[in-house]
Image (cartoon, rainbow, N blue to C red):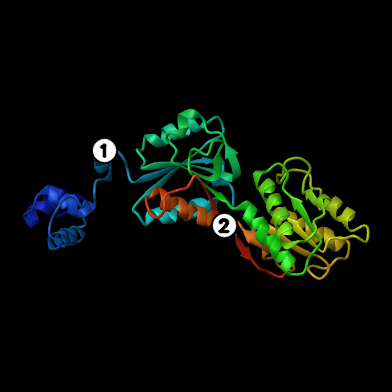
Amino acid sequence: MARSKVSLQDLAGRLGVSVKTVSGALSGDASIRMAEETRKRIRTLADELGYRPNLVARGMRQGVMPIIGIVADGLITQPFATEIMRAFDNSVRTDGLSVVVTSTGSGRSVETSVGELQRFMPRAIAYATMYHQVVDLPPAARDAIALMINCRGTDEAIPALVPAERDAAEAITHRLIEAGRRRIAFFNLPGLLAGTLRAEGFRAAHQEAGVAMVQDWIRPATRGTYSNQARSLVLEHVADLFAGPDRPDAILCGNDRVALEVYGALRRHNLSIPDDVAVASFDNQVEIAARLDPPLTTMALPHRAMGRRAAEILAGHGAPARAIEEIPFRLVERASV
């Protein structure tokens, strides 16, 4: 019998049971009662004959396919955020699910992307962004989206997984304070939600530790909203802060790219890392952080953990999603502190 032609009827005929019994054994439907020995015999024969379920037919009967849809707002083109997709895809595959991704932008709206995914009859649809932000989803798409990843809605009506930005800033600032640093500057990411939340954590850590903070030392790393194309202010800040006797003994950087610039600026002033100035950061962009001299202490973005948790939620495992679920960063200790 050709492996590709094996049907439920073939299995039922060989074993002398009903098609309904075979279907229940292979699908795991607990409502169809049978002896455990019968269930094992059916599954064993199905494996021996190479039976493969007709997923399209099953999807038509059940109204859903074994698919999770992702609407990606630029996500799949960003080096960091692709970690979300890799972890998500690897996790859902263990449940026999597949992932279909469609992107917004270039004239394609969220509503259009959701409509494209709905043609596949997915079990669920998620919306993901390339960086942490607040997203005002159009009303037509809200009812279709079950989870937001790396972003949150304006009204928090849809469950969301986001990086724990404030906690991460508290943790890395406490690490600097524990290392004996008491005069910490922060070159933050202006115009980004991550920057706002990290500044809150930076201030909170100082207050909790009873360490005085210089408000003027929280400075924007770039002119205008942060991006890789925005004009850097790092050289100017380092020249200003180290011009007089009241100098920082540590600099917290908004991300590893900013830290790379800080390394160069400090060396222009013959300052040693970490002896004269400790440097810490966010992201754990390994091609930068691990190759700097000395290697950079940084908070790793939780993108893989977000992908795994999203898969868990949408596949129906574990605890249900909360309105806003913050996923913790991971401290990566290297030699710059």
Residue pointed to by mark 1: 60
Q: Judging from the image, what secondary structure is the residue with disc 1 in?
A: helix
Q: What residue type is labelled 2?
A: Pro
Q: Which one is earlier in the sequence, the residue at label 1 or at label 2?
A: 1
Task: Assign the N terminus to one quadrant of the image.
Answer: bottom left
Give the answer, above or below, for where 337 lies relative to 112: below
Q: What residue type is labelled 1?
A: Met
Is residue 117 visible to the viewer in this orientation of the structure?
yes
Across and down, in percent, residue 268 comes to 87, 61
Q: Judging from the image, what secondary structure is the residue with disc 2 in?
A: loop
Q: Residue lying farthest left? A: 16
Q: Residue lying farthest right? A: 244
Q: Nearer the viewer, mark 1 or mark 2?
A: 2
- Distance between the alpha carbons at the discs numbered 1 and 2: 40 Å
Q: Which residue is drawn at 80% across and 64% down?
A: 182
Answer with the quarter of the image where residue 55 lies. Answer: top left
95 or 105: nearer the viewer: 95
Residue pointed to by mark 2: 328
9 or 252: nearer the viewer: 252
Is 49 displayed left or right of 238 in the figure? left
Is residue 3 visible to the viewer in this orientation of the structure?
no
Across and down, in percent, residue 174 comes to 70, 63
Give the answer, above or below, for where 211 lies relative to 215: below
Across and down, in percent, residue 103 comes to 51, 39
Q: Residue at x 63, y 65 (%)?
A: 332
Answer with the quarter of the image where residue 229 lies. Answer: top right
Is 9 displayed left or right of 82 in the figure? left
Q: Residues within 10 Å of mark 2 (few under 14, many from 20)?
A: many
Q: Residue at x 10, y 52 (%)?
A: 12
Image mark for residue 19? none
Q: Residues within 10 Å of mark 1 (few under 14, many from 20)?
A: few
